[in-house]
Image: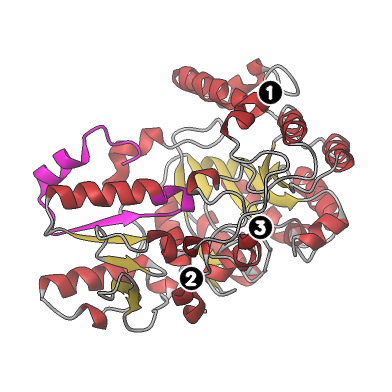
Amino acid sequence: MRFERRRVTAILGAFRPEVVGIACLHILDVPATLELAQQIKAFDKAIFVAVGGHAASAYPTALDHNVALDAICIGEGENVMASLCDAIEKRKPLDDVPSLLLPDGNDGLRASSANEWLNLPDVKPPDRSTVARYQKHYCCLNYMPVWTLETARGCPHRCKFCSVWQFYRRTYRCHAAANVRQDFEAAGQHVFVIDDLFWADKEQSRDLAHALLASPERKRWILVQSRPDLVSESADLLELWRPLAKNFDIFFGFESPTGSGLNSLHKESDISKTVGAIKLARKLGFGVTGNFIIDPDFSEDDFAALWQFLDEHQLYRVGFTILTPLPGTYYFEQTVARLKVLDWNQYDLHHLLWTPRLPVQRFFELYSQTWQRTVLNTAGRKKWWRWLKDVEPRHLPRLARILMRTKRMMDPSAYLAETRICDGAPEPQATEAAQPDVVAQDRK
């Protein structure tokens, strides 16, 4: 629905579905998910509406008490949706379908049979023809269109701000190399590998690299995500993977320029690993990009230390997000009592959810100055004309529109206009809607 021009009622009228599934991937999607569910029920109350996705699974409380929802699918959806549709078609009891939360008749939810985790080698590659009409809209950085590819799921680490390791219970599982190769060959020239921790299983990664290298397919651009400490110890793997694309970028979870900052985020790493990973990646011909986390508790000295680190290591292709306790994480449960904003629209990692150490205006002035040190500032570190070598001429107008929109990220007034807190505001008490989810606790 992000790219569909038809109204949902037109789609429902043409297709006449018995079941509609909605993917609620991020907590930001909750308001749109509920609105869409209500539109579907208004069209036809008989349609069974199921919601799944990462956010719905991690924090179903956000969807509680909504009569437009008939089920919440917990965990991985490939098997759940097939089983759910089969049960509805054959009038089987839904309590026998695994990994569901169903209305209990008392404005609450009850769990069906136990969650089922997939054996990833049995999961078939996706049918890309189903989204072919929307493919031109998918972009990442200055590459478009972009195809996503998955080779593994999960992460064994325990970063404080991350919901992935809790969602997958610190497991890490890999797809079959033959299936990944089939999907790799079906994808286009720009590929974003959506694994949260690439190269984590070195033996599996080596086998997969050999399988892909045996294929004649090569890409113009590949982006993978990984940790600096892992990359710094994987020179042989990086060398093996490098020939698969003309341009090969690594997105690092840098998070902090200091050892104390990494410790506070439970990164279980140190700055020497970060510096080593940057040097190794560049030596082997990889592009270096990534993200740093801006803690609301930052002082002016903390911002200065970050800027110094960026300049010292020439990190100008990075992003900056504000530390945000995502619902469904232990961090959210620990901080919910001090949160001053419980509007899910503010949980995009670029809003303040409690009063920072610095005055709010000063915080956003420094935050905006931090963004001004990136490639988004086409008048600064990277001139606009240097984008041209990686962009097809037909995509230039769209890239120009994107860059113009990102200029807001360097404007303190844009942040202040959307800020819901003010200096000296009283600490609120946790509301019922913000209490840790009992069902999720039981699941853990």
Residue 228: within the magenta? no
Disc 3 designates what residue?
338
Crowding near the residue tagged with mark 3, few <14, some 14–19, many ≥20 C-alpha atoms within 10 Å: some
* Residue beneath the point at 74% across and 50% down: 254
Residue 377 shows which numbered tag? 1
Inter-mark Cα distance, 2 to 3: 17 Å
Q: Image height check: is 430 above or below 358? A: below
Q: Give the class, few, some or many, for how many residues have Cα within 10 Å of label 2's Cα (few <14, many ≥20).
A: some
Answer whether residue 128 is visible to the viewer in this image: no
State how far apart marks 1 and 2 are (Cα).
41 Å
Which sits in the foreground, 323 or 207?
323
Q: Is mark 1 on a helix, strand or loop?
A: loop
Q: Do the residues labelled 1 and 2 touch (CB within 8 Å)?
A: no
> Disc 3 vs disc 1: which is toward the camera?
3
- For marks 1 and 2, give the one nearer the viewer: 2
Tag 3–tag 1 contact (CB < 8 Å): no
- Give 416 or 230, whichever is nearer the viewer: 416
Q: Give the range drawn in magenta.
A: 1-30
Q: Name the residue under label 2.
A: 437
Horizontal and vertical percent for residue 185? 42, 50
Q: Which residue is found at the position 53% from the left and 51% from the top?
A: 342
Tell me which amino acid carries mark 3: Arg
